[in-house]
Amino acid sequence: QQPVQSPQAVILREGEDAVINCSSSKALYSVHWYRQKHGEAPVFLMILLKGGEQKGHDKISASFNEKKQQSSLYLTASQLSYSGTYFCGTEAGGYNKLIFGAGTRLAVHP
Amino acid sequence: EAQVTQNPRYLITVTGKKLTVTCSQNMNHEYMSWYRQDPGLGLRQIYYSMNVEVTDKGDVPEGYKVSRKEKRNFPLILESPSPNQTSLYFCASSPGGDVNEQYFGPGTRLTVT
């Protein structure tokens, strides 16, 4: 089953914060986060492993609640370069069978 | 430069005419995958491969074939394309293990008329 991402779209002013959620109906081994800019390929942001720590990447961080089978991506003090579509990908079996959510479109305006 | 390449980048074809989209990676990755991307549906995995001669179905394998005869190459074959296979296709490779980061190719936009 495809993980559910929320919200579907977010509009921000530069400097504002946002949270993107990813929820699965299955027990998860790991959660991936990717960002895709218009007309480009998705680019890896970070991976969270079962039993692992919260990750951070510049002002983008993420958490993974294994019991709730949920992950959240936190974007703080957003920049124009953060605009794009964010996808979570979940691994339940740990065999590279990655299932992506439908994506969250993020637009950051000056 | 570490990369995944796909060819062609754009393709317009007619229903029923067999086609192959090539994918190659230069990172010596064990794993490779094919995804299709459609508006509102995200990325859906078509097939994946864990090593040479080892492939398995993803979520939407119908109408597609793959082969992995060499580690670096993972072509996607559409034996008899249909209009519902019009989509944006991405190939990806990953090293496996815990941090199984996917490296995506630039994409192939396929239109079947």
Image (spheres, helix red, strand yellow):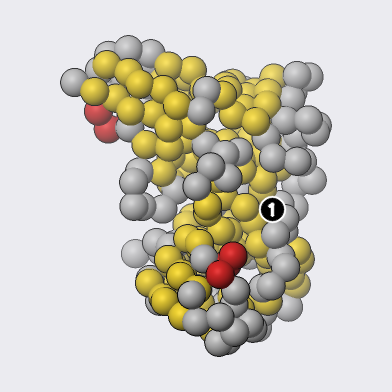
Residue A54 vertical placement versus B107 (above, below): above
Residue A91 vertical placement versus A61 (above, below): below
Q: Position of residue B23 (x, y in %)?
A: 50, 73
Viewer can see residue B82: yes
Q: Amino acid type of disc 1? A: Asn
Q: Residue at x 59, y 84 (%)?
A: B16
Q: Residue at x 46, y 69 (%)?
A: B110
Q: Residue at x 56, y 58 (%)?
A: B36
Residue A21 vertical placement versus A35 (above, below): above
Instruction: Return the residue nearer the eye: A86 or B81.
Output: B81
Q: Residue furthest left?
A: A110
Where is residue A57, by image quadrant? top left
Quickly name the residue at label 1: A96
Q: Quadrant of the C terminus of chain A?
A: top left
Would you say B5 lies left or right of A12 here?
right
Instruction: Return the residue nearer the eye: B78 or B91.
Output: B78
Q: Residue at x 73, y 78 (%)?
A: B53
Q: Position of residue B79 (x, y in %)?
A: 64, 83
Would you say A77 lies left or right of B78 here?
left
Residue A32 vertical placement versus B82 (above, below): above
Secondary structure under tag 1 reads loop
Viewer can see residue B98: no
Q: Position of residue A53 (x, y in %)?
A: 62, 22
Q: Position of residue A108 (x, y in %)?
A: 29, 25
Would you say A67 lies left or right of B36 here?
right
Where is residue A101, by image quadrant? top right
Q: Residue furthest bottom?
A: B17
Instruction: Return the residue nearer the eye: A94 or A52.
Output: A94
Where is residue A76, by image quadrant? top left
